[in-house]
Amino acid sequence: MADERTKIDANQTHTVAGITYDVSEDITNLTVNPVDKRLRVDAAITSDTNNVFDNYGLYAWSDDGTTFYACYQKTDAKWIIIKIVQSTGVTTYATGDTDASTNWTNKASQTYEDFATKF
């Protein structure tokens, strides 16, 4: 590390700092937007092309106190139902290509699998 002390600003006040993630591990001041006082971040945000929920919207949800279900649907009629057993936190998924309405009505009888198996 180059200098292991935080920087002091023009008013002799210690500032918030971060360590660079390269081999030099330099300490550097973090900067804040002067208008909204939010941390300034210079980064490109890209979408995850592997996100199975891209372009899905919430169709319906229900919670009976023991099991939570949420159904998401795409405009092309594909759907995903998420089932969470509240006592264990186990989350499983059912999917289909058509008729979200009927499959939502029959959500308890769907075949659910874990994320790695289903997707």
Image (cartoon, rainbow, N blue to C red):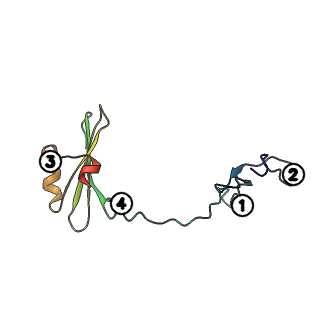
| Residue at (47, 66) in percent of width and height | 46
Residue 37 sits above or below residue 68 on the image: below
What is the quadrant of the C terminus in the image?
A: bottom left
Residue marked by disc 4: 51
Q: Earlier in the sequence, mark 4 or mark 1?
A: 1
| Spatial CA span between label 4 and label 3 | 22 Å
Q: Is residue 54 left or right of residue 2?
A: left
Residue marked by disc 2: 11
| Residue at (68, 60) in percent of width and height | 33
Residue marked by disc 1: 34
| Spatial CA span between label 1 and label 3 | 53 Å
Q: Is residue 47 left or right of residue 17?
A: left
Q: Earlier in the sequence, mark 1 or mark 3?
A: 1
Q: Residues within 10 Å of mark 1 (few under 14, many from 20)?
A: few
In front of the other: label 2 or label 4? 4
Task: Give the label on residue 110, or none.
Answer: 3
Secondary element type, mark 3: loop
Q: Is residue 30 left or right of residue 59?
A: right
